[in-house]
Image (cartoon, rainbow, N blue to C red):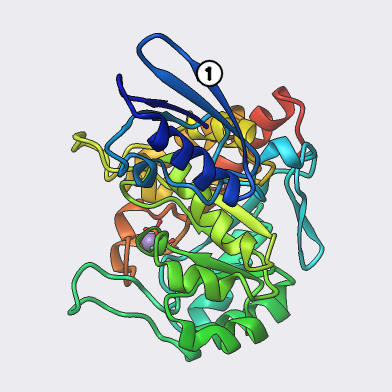
Amino acid sequence: MIISTKKGTPQVELDRIIDNFEKQGLSVTLIRGEDYNVFGLVGDTTKIAEKDVLANPWVDNVTRVSAPYKRANRLFHPEDTVIDVRGVQVGAAAPVTVMAGPCSIEGAEHTMRMAQLVKAGGATMLRGGAYKPRTSPYSFQGLGTEGILDMVRAREATGLPIVSELMDEAHIDEFEEYVDVVQIGARNMQNFQLLKAVGKMHKPVLLKRGLANTIEEWIMSAEYIMAGGNEQVLLCERGIRTFEKYTRNTLDLSAIPVVKEKTHLPVIVDPSHATGNYKYVQSMAMAAVAAGADGLEIEVHDNPQCAWSDGAQCLKPDLFAETIEKCRLIAHAVGREM
Ligand code: PEP
Ligand code: MN
């Protein structure tokens, strides 16, 4: 971290600044200029916030040289992390993974049918929401435990690991017992209490990027989970809010190489919530694989017009299978199995 102080800062203030940082275990180098003084701080500066340093009226400018995250940082963990989900490997050179299924779980029979259909179309995991974060309190809120148990039965029949969203700490025991990948939805990306709780879990976490969050904020949320002891984090880009209206969100494809450069965690892309329209899902899925995504999360429904949520963005099983086939060609072209 580099700090410059204002012209004419008295020596006693400079000494106070040095003393304050040294007490925090940092080594401080002072470069004296004619008008300004510049400090270089070396050590673990993750606990220091730039805006707190600026609270000192003698401080003119603060520049962070290193990233504020440690555990997620590729600098301290150069190898790609590979996450094992019931025998399905995700990350590094592992085959591109495919999490697919309905937005909401819609009962035992439908879940079983969807699991079989997505498996036949190339899915490696079954996704489905039993607790739904809906914008309106009057919309369907999810089947709850019953939905989770529908997924468990589908897993027993197909062998597909199950991915489902956790919204409330109160359901942690249920998820620990039944769910293979705990999804933290975009709306909860900065629910720090929930992130801390998930950091104590023993299951991989699929952390979706918030609707309007920067990549650094997203990685800091991963850091929350990892700081709690759970290092099995998968980052999921699902589109961010922009001024564009023709798509539900804007898929930030550039997040894939950026996250891969900054962190060692696997990156999953959700082209369904990113576009909000089934017509655009295939091309964005192919683009994500081309850009190096370690996996896809895609909503699939056999009768999208009657889906209990997000029907407009669900692929019918045939289009899903065709999409995976095309993604496979892309994966092979970029030297990846799928
Ligand atoms: C979902 O995956 O069903 C979901 C609600 O996604 P997001 O949190 O990305 O909106
Ligand atoms: Mn959905």
Q: Residue at x 38, y 52 (%)?
A: 210
Q: Nearer the viewer, residue 241 or 32?
A: 32
The image position of residue 220, as x and y in percent, is: 50, 51
Q: Is residue 131 left or right of residue 226?
A: left
Number of on-image labels:
1
Quarter of the image where ligand 1 sits:
bottom left
Q: Quadrant of residue 215?
A: top left
Q: Is residue 12 left or right of residue 212?
A: right
Q: Residue at x 41, y 78 (%)?
A: 131
Q: Residue at x 63, y 62 (%)?
A: 227
SS at circle 1: strand
Q: Residue at x 60, y 43 (%)?
A: 324
The image position of residue 315, as x and y in percent, is: 43, 52
Say which residue label 1 marks. 31
Task: Tell me if I can see residue 53 in this picture.
Answer: yes
In the image, residue 111 sits, relative to residue 186, either above or below, namely below
The image position of residue 241, as x and y in percent, is: 27, 43
Q: Which quarter of the figure is the C terminus placed in?
A: top right
The image position of residue 164, as x and y in percent, is: 53, 71
**Residue furthest top in the image:** 34
In the image, residue 165 sits, relative to residue 282, either above or below, namely below
Mark 1 CB within 8 Å of ligand 1: no
Callout 1 amino acid: Ile
Q: Nearer the viewer, residue 306 or 95?
A: 95
